[in-house]
Image (cartoon, helix red, strand yellow):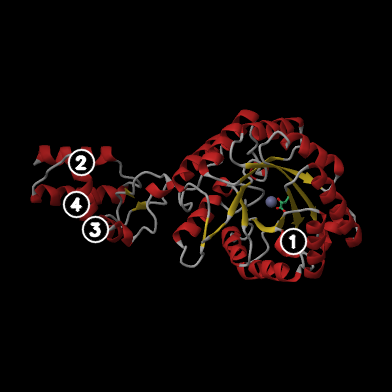
Amino acid sequence: MTDTIRIFDTTLRDGEQSPGCSMNLEEKLRVAAQLEALGVDIIEAGFAIASEGDFEAVSAVAKQCETAVVASLARAALGDIDRAWAAVRHAKQPRIHTFIATSPLHMRVKLNLTPEATLEAIRTSVSHARNLCADIEWSAEDATRTDPDFLCRAVEIAIAAGASTINLPDTVGYATPETYGAMFRDVIKRVPNADKAVFSTHCHNDLGLAVANTLAAIMGGARQVESTINGIGERAGNAAVEEIAMAIKVRGDIIPFRTNVVSTEITRASRLVSGITGMAVQANKAIVGANAFAHESGIHQDGMIKDAGTYEIMTPDSVGQGATNLVLGKHSGRAAFRQKLDELGYKLSDNEFGDAFKRFKDLADAKKAIWDEDIVALVDDEVLRG
Ligand code: KIV
Ligand code: ZN
């Protein structure tokens, strides 16, 4: 039996923290509906104390969701936790997600708390949350820059106070796969009551390592993954859920887990979030980019026509992207050009084909993109001149 990795989607909270990505209530409800269709297990709907609008949105998402657990974020302050609970309590499966920073820098500069006072705040906040709600997640903000002994003490206290999910975020995207995986192994081995909690990974992409670090954390013992659609989030973003889900699906040989993600819903989710937030998806973005299944070089196109497995490790259909796209350009060869003519309904003699192909190559040298209309014009001209 393969272990299931729970997907905790934070598009509506950490994703919304991307500059310019804030969403209104109606938009959040549409994204939440698509997240459920995608099969995510937990939806972090917002930060209820942040504003009246966020509170309303978290409550509305909590009321709407049928299958997913709905979480609201809260700092380690009783007022924050009460507000989070007031917003999520309508959910079929509510969760309070409370956090405090544990790194020396954050405790000293941001919180102005001693390490002992921070441990006391963890005890008080988690027990308070647990008295309200059965499902509590606790996060050690900036875990990857926290002293390992102190992190273990903090985690032990959070579990003893009632947290059933322990999140160890790489808040500033500082970790590498080796260090992040090792941190999970170490904490899970050293904390006496670690088996009472599910460990969670939450990676930011400052060094472009968020997805690699997430996979390393899974191999180190994490069984919940926090991520966002299209990887949107603070600064360089969060780990992208579509990349993690497909990495697990495609590389089950070395990442022997499963998720509940319905992969054919991935592109719909990506387009919805990009349309609502106005945050465009780069063309070469893995899985959901416009070029993720496009092939321009002649050698690749020839291989693709013979067997798609030559240059595709998953089908575009499997992620809801439609068909493979053999893009005509200056690197394309005769095979792709002939296939395009077939698609457009042209039957040319060998001579006509040879001339049309030469004229296509000249055009491709002069023009960045070749559209079907260009081919039609070029071939009609060829046939007329014929
Ligand atoms: O990056 C982070 O540390 C967070 C926490 C609040 C979970 O987003
Ligand atoms: Zn974060």
Reading the image, the residue beneath label 2 is 378
Q: Secondary structure at mark 4?
A: helix
Q: Secondary structure at mark 1?
A: helix
Which label's residue is closer to the chain start, 4 or 3? 3
The residues tagged by marks 1 and 4 sit, at their Cα atoms, a distance apart of: 60 Å
Which label's residue is closer to the chain start, 3 or 2? 3
Q: Residues within 10 Å of mark 4 (few under 14, many from 20)?
A: few
Residue at 73% in and 67% down: 187
Q: What amino acid is labelled 4 in the image? A: Lys
Which label's residue is closer to the chain start, 1 or 2? 1
Reading the image, the residue beneath label 1 is 143
Give the side of residue 77 with respect to residue 343, left or right.
right
Q: Residues within 10 Å of mark 1 (few under 14, many from 20)?
A: many
Q: Is residue 378 above or below residue 59?
A: below
Label 1 near ligand 1 (CB < 8 Å): yes
Q: Do callouts 1 and 3 mark residues in contact (Cβ within 8 Å)?
A: no
The residues tagged by marks 1 and 3 sit, at their Cα atoms, a distance apart of: 49 Å
Reading the image, the residue beneath label 3 is 306
The residues tagged by marks 1 and 2 sit, at their Cα atoms, a distance apart of: 60 Å
The residues tagged by marks 3 and 2 sit, at their Cα atoms, a distance apart of: 26 Å
The label nearer to you, 1 versus 2, is 1
